[in-house]
């Protein structure tokens, strides 16, 4: 049994929660979207793409989770989370823009837990 | 306490609707549930329908309700708001009924739906979401009424403060 290295999912959880905290602080301070949040979203996006690459490599090596369609769905949907949140948050010119970004951070963290449930070889 | 006491929003805002302000976050959460419930229902029905037919049909029903709520909240016209009130109400009743049903009759639910156990698998967000949805719609219906009553001086009269509709799962 070989496992997917847990460093990337763990980093995504930490980054997602940090992003959520930062964004909620911006909401609490009544601040709009700024460059800082967009950069943080970009970092999250890169991490998610790296993870997709790792999992695809794992699939290519012949291993299979219990439900392949579910895993594929997650792999396809995951990279869109920061992109859609970034767009949806950036067009909102109030404190609620950062709140949307914060949601994306939370979602990224939750997705890591779900991924582990779908395919336990993906460690957290 | 949804009276004008809250913080003044920046007055430069472009045309506001149920889509802007706290609505932005609300629609983001609704969209997330619309997407995940739809995907989940499709996979379940396509791959293992006979395993838990009742649960999967209810998953699909929940998915439709979330899609309707997302679209109508994003649209925000008077008709859309009326449909949104209905779908959020159906959603709330659905969470309560399916939640209770899933606890009382576990045999019918060998696999979970979005609304099983009042949405416990999703941090109880499905239980709380329709409440925020209905509060937000009520805020807008009041505001529309106020604007219809006093047409002249633009906008600001009906500025009922934007309150915290943004509770997350965490």
Image: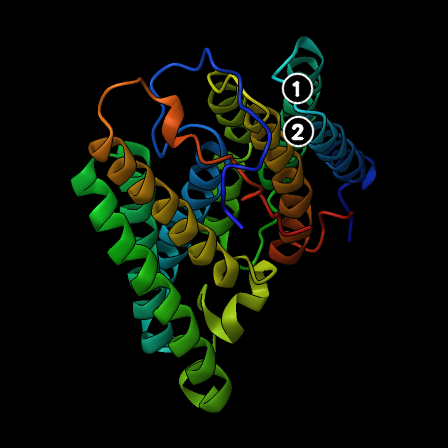
Residue A123, numbered circle: none
Question: Which SS class for mark 1?
Answer: loop
Question: Which SS class for mark 2?
Answer: helix
Chain under label 1? A
Give the residue displayed 40% in from the left and 85% down from the top.
Answer: B108
Q: How packed is label 2: few (under 14 Cα within 10 Å), some, or many (20 or more)? A: many
Q: From the viewer's perspective, is residue A81 above or below residue A110?
A: above
Q: How packed is label 1: few (under 14 Cα within 10 Å), some, or many (20 or more)? A: some
Residue A106: x, y in percent? Answer: 66, 41
Residue bearing the label numbered 2: A27
User: Count of labels shown?
Assistant: 2
Q: From the viewer's perspective, is residue A82 above or below residue A32?
A: below
Q: Is residue B112 among what the camera can see?
A: no
Give the residue displayed 83% in from the left and 36% down from the top.
Answer: A7
Say which of B150 and A45 sits in front: B150
Q: From the viewer's perspective, is residue B84 above or below residue B86?
A: above
Residue B145: x, y in percent? Answer: 25, 40
Residue B143: x, y in percent? Answer: 33, 37
Q: From the viewer's perspective, is residue A53 above or below residue B60?
A: above
Chain under label 2? A
Residue B25: x, y in percent? Answer: 50, 36
Residue bearing the label numbered 1: A31
**Residues at circles 1 and 2 in contact by the CB criterion of under 8 Å:** yes
Q: Is residue B169 among what the camera can see?
A: yes
Give the residue displayed 55% in from the left and 59% down from the top.
Answer: A66
Give the residue displayed 34% in from the left and 55% down from the top.
Answer: B63
Single out the residue that lies furthest toward the left.
B79
Q: Quadrant of residue A5?
A: top right
Marks 1 and 2, how far apart at CA: 6 Å
Q: Quadrant of residue B141?
A: top left
- Left or right: B70 in relation to A3: left
Say which of A26 and A71 sits in front: A26
């Amino acid at each position: 049994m070989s496992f997917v290295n847990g460093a990337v999912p763990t980093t995504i959880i930490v980054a997602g929660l940090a992003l959520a905290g930062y964004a909620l602080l911006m909401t609490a301070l009544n601040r709009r979207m700024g460059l800082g949040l967009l950069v943080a979203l970009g970092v999250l996006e890169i991490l998610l793409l790296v993870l997709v690459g790792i999992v695809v490599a794992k699939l290519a090596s012949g291993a299979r989770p219990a439900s392949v369609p579910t895993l594929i769905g997650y792999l396809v949907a995951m990279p869109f989370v920061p992109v859609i949140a970034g767009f949806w948050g950036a067009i909102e010119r109030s404190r609620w823009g950062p709140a949307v970004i914060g949601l994306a951070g939370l979602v990224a963290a939750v997705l890591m837990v779900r991924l582990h449930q779908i395919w336990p070889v993906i460690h957290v | 306490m949804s009276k004008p006491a809250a913080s003044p929003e920046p007055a430069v805002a472009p045309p506001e609707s149920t889509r802007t302000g706290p609505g932005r976050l609300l629609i983001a959460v609704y969209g997330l549930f619309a997407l995940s419930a739809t995907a989940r229902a499709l996979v379940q029905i396509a791959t293992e329908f006979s395993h838990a037919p009742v649960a999967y049909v209810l998953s699909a029903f929940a998915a439709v309700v979330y899609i309707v709520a997302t679209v109508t909240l994003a649209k925000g016209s008077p008709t859309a708001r009326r449909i949104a009130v209905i779908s959020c109400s159906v959603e709330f009743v659905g969470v309560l009924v399916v939640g209770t049903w899933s606890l009382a009759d576990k045999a019918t639910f060998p696999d979970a739906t979005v609304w099983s156990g009042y949405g416990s698998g999703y941090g109880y967000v499905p239980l709380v979401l329709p409440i925020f949805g209905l509060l937000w719609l009520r805020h807008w219906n009041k505001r529309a009424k106020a604007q219809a009553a006093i047409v002249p001086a633009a906008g600001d009269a009906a500025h009922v403060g934007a309150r915290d509709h943004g509770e997350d799962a965490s």
